[in-house]
Amino acid sequence: MPLCPRRLRKSFAVLLVLAAMGGPALAGDPAQPAGAPLAAVAVADQPENIRADDVAAIAEMARGYGEAEQTAVGNGDPVIVGEMNGIAYQLFFLECTDNRDCKVLDFYAIWDAPGVQLTTVNEWNRTRPFNKAYLGEDGLPVIELNLSTAGGLTRGQLGDAFDRWAVALADFQRSVVETAF
């Protein structure tokens, strides 16, 4: 059985060509002086906030990590469907009013990999504080990363979330999904 993640949107049938990760480095910018707070550096580099309903700006940032397509779910709320290093994911915009003014971004991925053990998922959760993982109702492994958008996000904060998500996707596939086979 292949280890590729399952796509939630059947209409997303375009062959995705992966781009190299282009987001900010997790360790910060080596050109910045030692001891400079990362939040201050991110704000200084990109002081503008991104509104949670600026789907185009968020999708543009997602494209720095791989392919990403803007679309909408059945109720009209925005969603970004993407792929990072061969792993499909969705970025849902939640708690929206009239398909705008969304208060939460929900990074989401599910693998078509029955046989993952709950104890393995629980161990992964215990050691990864920014994500949550679980077995869905169909027994398939899922990970999520939720991000509040209250007050907007700086490009640095959003870049940090994408960095964490890219690492989580790769780590979860290697540490949880691939151990089931």
Image (cartoon, rainbow, N blue to C red):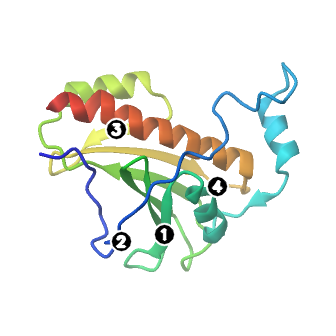
Crowding near the residue tagged with mark 3, few <14, some 14–19, many ≥20 C-alpha atoms within 10 Å: many
- Residue type at mark 1 is Glu
Say whether residue 131 is visible: no
* Residue that mark 1 sits on: 69
Select label 3 or label 1 by which is in front. Answer: 1
Q: Name the residue nearer the viewer: 152 or 33.
A: 33
Select label 2 or label 1 by which is in front. Answer: 2
Question: Which part of the image, by quadrant, shows the C terminus?
Answer: top left
> Where is residue 171 drawn, in percent x and y?
39, 32
Question: Which part of the image, by quadrant, shows the N terminus?
Answer: top left
* Residue that mark 4 sits on: 149
Mark 1 vs mark 4, CA separation in Å: 20 Å
- Residue type at mark 4 is Thr
Is there a contact, CB below 8 Å, between mark 4 and mark 2?
no
For residue 53, above or below residue 105: below
> Where is residue 124 drawn, in percent x and y?
34, 26
**Left or right: 172 as drawn, with respect to 28:** left
